[in-house]
Every structure is written in structure tokens, then in C-alpha cells.
Amino acid sequence: MGTHRRAAAGAAGIALALALSLVLSGCGPAPWDFGAEPTSSASPSTTPSEAPTPVPNDLSSGSTARELVAGAVAASVDYWSTLSMDRWTAEALKPVNLSMTTTVTPDDGQKVYLQRAVMVAVPQGPDGAMAPLEAQIDQSSVAPGYLVLSPYSYSQTFNVGSLPADATHVQLQFSYDFLVQTTPTSSEFAKQTASDTVTVAIAASPDSGDDAESDADG
């Protein structure tokens, strides 16, 4: 009788162990199964927000210097503005100063003259270039031109007028026409042209924030 009870208890224990094993296998790997691969949880995908494109500004430090080459002529040009960059708003009158000297190679004693300097301001906005402003031209009033061979220099101030309200920056396109003596004593000249572009950021108008608030209130 005792033998039958022990056998029945043993059979019941085996059945319970098998049932427990089936339950655990249906719920995933057992806690002591260290070789099992962990179940990966899906994480929601996020799209990184694009940072705004910085506006270029060649005068951010107050000035910029350029080395231009036109044939035998090398020109050193400094650009700056007496108006601080935070006041370069679309509606402001924005002065641009420049100073230039040149050298010539080979230097046989011939002179270099600046016959004409031109600046064209082209506003730039979110959709690209806008209509350019009227060209500003400094045509030499003396023949054959302004002597710009170092140590003599040329200085001028151009002004950038009112721009569209949505302009973010403006490209100042410069061109310089030089006349170079063919020989130190010659009255014949060779013409060389150099070009340059200076980009300046347009600051937000001080009234723009007030306008936005008034629009929101209205």
C-alpha cells in the first residue's frame, strides 16, 4: 500500500514538472537560461530637426581683405563698414568702404590706373536672388584713370540702399577696370578687369518683433 502511494506521488511530481516546463517555455526563456537572446523592444523612430542654415557675412569681424589678380595686376582690397552689423537692416542706408593698392608683374616701371569701379547690390532671400539694385559707378574723371600703383591708393564709399523686407543677406558684386602702361614711357595701355563679391548679412529690424506681436494680438 505504501509502495503504491509513493509511486502515485512520484508520477504526480513528474506531471507537475512537465506542466511547469510547458508553461515556462510558452512565456519565453527561463530566468536561469543565460544563453538566451534578449527580446528587443521596438523604439519609436524620431526625425531630427534641421538646424537653420547660418547666414554668411564677410564683414562679421568688421572688415575683410581680398587679393585680386587681373593679368599682370595684383590688387589688395580692404572692405569695411562704418555702420555696425546689427544696424544693417533692410531699410537702412548701409555704407561700404573700400581701399585699394596694386602691384604689377613684371615691374619695369610702368604705372597702373583704375579707370572704373562698379558695385551692384543683389539682395538674397529664402527663395534665392532678388532683383539687383541700381549699379553704383565711379568713373575716373581724369585720364587715363586714378593712379593705384603702390604706394598710391584708391579709396571710395558705396552705399547699399533699401532692400526687400524678407532679404536675409546681400551680395555686393564689385568690378574694377585697370589700365596698365605697356612700357614706362608709353601712352598705350592694356586693360585688365578684376571682380569680387562680398556677402553681408541683413539684421532683423528692431520693429519686426513689435509688428509680430501686434499681428498676433489682432
Image (tube, grey):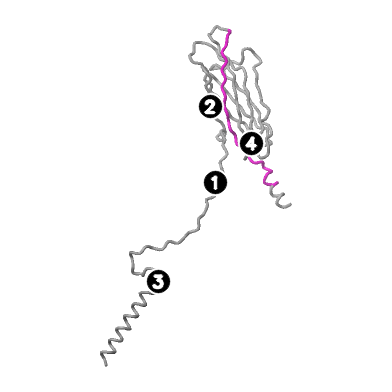
Q: Kindly identify which numbered label has been placed on residue 88.
A: 4
- Could you classify mark 2 by the number of other residues whose Cα lies within 10 Å: few (under 14), some (14-19), or many (20 or more)? some
Furthest-left residue in view? 3
- Could you classify mark 4 by the number of other residues whose Cα lies within 10 Å: few (under 14), some (14-19), or many (20 or more)? many
Secondary structure type for disc 1? loop
For marks 3 and 4, give the one nearer the viewer: 3
Where is residue 35? Give x, y as percent.
33, 64
Q: Are marks 3 and 4 in contact (CB under 8 Å)?
A: no
Q: Nearer the viewer, residue 213 or 182?
A: 182
- The earlier-in-sequence mark between 2 and 1 is 1
Secondary structure type for disc 2? strand
Q: Are marks 2 and 1 in contact (CB under 8 Å)?
A: no
Q: How many angstroms separate mark 2 from mark 1 (CA)?
A: 30 Å
For marks 1 and 4, give the one nearer the viewer: 1
Query: Which quarter shows the N terminus?
Result: bottom left
Q: How many angstroms separate mark 3 from mark 1 (CA)?
A: 48 Å
Kindly identify which residue carries mark 2.
66
Kindly identify which residue carries mark 1.
51
For marks 2 and 1, give the one nearer the viewer: 1
Residue 16 forms part of the magenta stretch: no
